[in-house]
Amino acid sequence: MTRPTPDDDLAQIAFDELGRMSFAEHSLQSVLQKVTDLAARVLPGEPATSVTIVDGGRATTVAASDLLARQLDHVQYAQGSGPCLQAATTGVVVELLDTATEQRWAPFPAVAAQRDCRGVMSFPLPPQELIRGGLNVYSRTSQPLDERTREVAARFAAYAVVPVSNMYLYESAVERAEHLRTALDSRAVIDQAKGILMERFKLSADQAFSALAKLSMESNTRVRDIAERFVETGELPPA
């Protein structure tokens, strides 16, 4: 029987920590920071990590452990190709083992090498997720990525992408709900203002809204703000 090595024990502790993460205790940024801290503990090469999300054909770095990861992500976005984009859009793990000799995705490998990044591994978010994206690991070791590093990184990513993608989806849902609540609040106060105008000046619903819209354009103020002030004070701004 093969005995686990100290590295294996450390990796398992990291995996257990990832599995225990809860929405109540973290934001997307804190989830990524936790992933980053754990990656530094279990992966050699002083790794920098980032998370790429592709939405509507546009790639975005939603979080990064440091400036290097964000910069190298943006180099790939600007040229329209690279390991992080390929992994995020194809759902296949992509490895760039040695930036000094890699010919794919030029000129990205040369740029990465100039910035002391020796290897890149990009792991797609699980196919069952509702978003396309990936976890990117940029290695700053002086040596090409070896088989052991790649194996541990792959295991780590398989655990890490789940809380990262779940938190992204959770925060996106909360943001959409907040936008919906704001929109409903705006509609409610505008309907109140319309009702007061209709009763006071014997206007139709369309005429009341047109009056609010006209005041909004003349004063360069949102219709919602005009309506809110009118509901609270009973006064309209001077025409």
Image (tube, grey):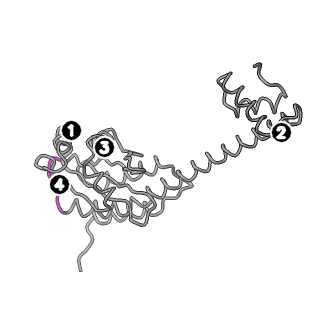
**Residue name at image x 35 percent, y 63 percent:** 158
Distance, label 1 to label 3, CA atoms, is 17 Å
Q: Is residue 75 above or below residue 129?
A: above
Residue 143 falls within the magenta-colored stretch? yes
Secondary structure of the residue carrying tag 3 is helix
| Residue 169, position as x, y percentages in the image | 50, 55
Secondary structure of the residue carrying tag 2 is helix
Closer to viewer: mark 4 or mark 2: 2
| Residue 96, position as x, y percentages in the image | 19, 53
Q: Identify the amino acid type marked 3.
A: Tyr
Which quarter of the figure is the N terminus placed in?
A: bottom left
Whether label 1 touches label 2, CB < 8 Å: no
- In the image, the segment drawn in magenta is 141-147
Tell whether 164 sits left or right of 191: left
Mark sitting earlier along the chain (4/3): 3
Q: Identify the amino acid type marked 4.
A: Leu
Q: Is residue 87 above or below residue 47?
A: below
Distance, label 4 to label 2, CA atoms, is 67 Å
Mark sitting earlier along the chain (1/2): 1
Residue at the bottom extreme, as displayed? 1
Residue 167 falls within the magenta-colored stretch? no
Closer to viewer: mark 1 or mark 3: 3
**Residue name at image x 31 percent, y 60 percent:** 90
Q: Identify the amino acid type marked 1.
A: Arg
Residue that carries the numbered disc 1 in the rendered image = 115
Which quarter of the figure is the C terminus placed in?
A: top right
> Which mark, residue 195?
2
Closer to viewer: mark 1 or mark 2: 2
Distance, label 1 to label 2, CA atoms, is 63 Å
Residue that carries the numbered disc 4 in the rendered image = 97
> Which mark, residue 77?
3
